[in-house]
Image (spheres, rainbow, N blue to C red):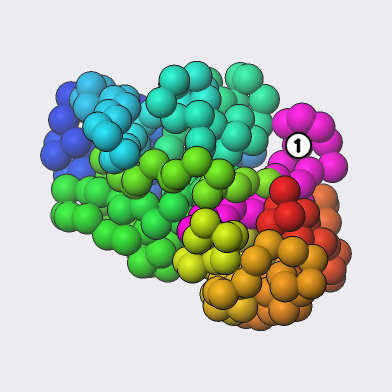
């Protein structure tokens, strides 16, 4: 089956075209084109946008705005984004990173979407023509979204406050067994005062480990003090099963890898 491709110069015009049945947005194409090639007959038309702002990276002080078409490769090589570069480099190999976009990551089902896990930990804001949405709310309702995402915004984490880990069977570009991102604020003596922990592959989309976050408050990052957080990490999870790993295996190794991330 052939696919029609429509190209627009503005997001507004593309949004209007995207409302037609069978139409999908084309960003980097790493998932939607592969799906069509593998026989996804639900897609008959693709919509793309050439608006330059979608590919812009803006860093002002500690505020970052990434256009939805910014690629993982562009993030990985940007001199001001070293803190989040490990999450961008975790996405596939070089060819995939040259195509995979910020916007596409937000919609990628598990076991994909590693950068969206990082954005969830960073408490990003997702922007579309319809307005701004906290990323946690966006991820919850993304299946019903038909508006083109234009950008994400977040604050650059302070030194040593943001941590990212991807576990895969094939190095260095295999898909995830799981991924974890954590944003931790600590006092001078190392006591955790704030924690956001995001998990990939523990549901069909990135999710927060809220029980583990609560258990970390007031703790120092020692094996003894983080033990309750590790025990609570599996609360509310529903890991996927795929050819890479089973639900059981992902649940078993989650506290092991969370402990490794927290202890550095």
- The residue lying at 31 percent from left, 45 percent from top is 153
- The residue lying at 36 percent from left, 67 percent from top is 137
Q: Where residue 126 sits in the image (x, y, percent)? A: 31, 51
Indicate left or right for 119 with 154 as reference: right
Q: Is residue 161 above or below residue 31?
A: below
Q: Where residue 86 sits in the image (x, y, percent)? A: 60, 34
Give the total of numbered labels. 1
- Asked whether 215 falls inside the magenta stretch, the response is no
Task: State the SS at label 1.
Answer: loop
Q: Is residue 49 among what the camera can see? A: no
Which range is magenta?
Answer: 166-185
- Asked whether 181 falls inside the magenta stretch, the response is yes
Indicate left or right for 150 with 100 as reference: left
Indicate left or right for 170 with 201 as reference: right
Residue 262, picture quadrant: bottom right
Q: Is residue 166 above or below residue 96?
A: below
Check the image and name the residue furthest to the front: 189
Residue ID for mark 1: 174
At label 1, counting other C-alpha atoms closer than 10 Å, the crowd grade (few under 14, some 14-19, many 20 or more) is: some
Q: Is residue 199 among what the camera can see? A: yes
Q: Nearer the viewer, residue 169 or 37?
A: 169
Q: Where residue 179 sits in the image (x, y, percent)? A: 67, 51
- The residue lying at 68 percent from left, 46 percent from top is 165
Residue 34, picture quadrant: top right
Q: Where residue 138 sits in the image (x, y, percent)? A: 36, 61
């Amino acid at each position: 089956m052939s696919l029609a491709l429509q190209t627009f110069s503005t997001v507004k015009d593309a949004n209007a075209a995207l409302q037609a049945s069978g139409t999908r947005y084309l960003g980097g194409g790493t998932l939607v084109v592969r799906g069509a090639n593998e026989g996804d007959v639900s897609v008959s038309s693709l919509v793309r946008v050439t608006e330059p702002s979608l590919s812009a990276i803006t860093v002002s002080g500690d505020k970052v705005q990434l256009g939805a078409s910014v690629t993982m490769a562009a993030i990985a090589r940007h001199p001001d984004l070293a803190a989040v570069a490990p999450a961008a480099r975790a996405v596939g190999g070089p060819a995939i990173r040259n195509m995979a976009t910020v916007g596409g990551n937000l919609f990628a089902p598990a076991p994909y979407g590693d950068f969206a896990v990082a954005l969830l930990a960073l408490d990003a804001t997702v922007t579309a023509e319809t307005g701004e949405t906290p990323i946690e709310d966006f991820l919850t309702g993304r299946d019903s979204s038909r508006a083109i995402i234009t950008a994400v915004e977040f604050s650059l984490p302070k030194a040593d406050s943001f941590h990212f880990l991807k576990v895969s069977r094939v190095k260095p570009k295999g898909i995830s067994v799981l991924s974890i991102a954590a944003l931790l604020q600590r006092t001078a003596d190392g006591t955790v005062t704030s924690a956001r922990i995001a998990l990939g592959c523990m549901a069909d989309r990135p999710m927060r480990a809220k029980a583990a976050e609560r258990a970390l408050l007031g703790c120092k990052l020692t094996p003894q003090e983080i033990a309750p957080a590790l025990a609570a990490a599996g609360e509310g999870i529903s890991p996927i099963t795929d050819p890479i790993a089973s639900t059981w295996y992902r649940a078993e190794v989650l506290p092991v890898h969370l402990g490794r991330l927290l202890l550095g």
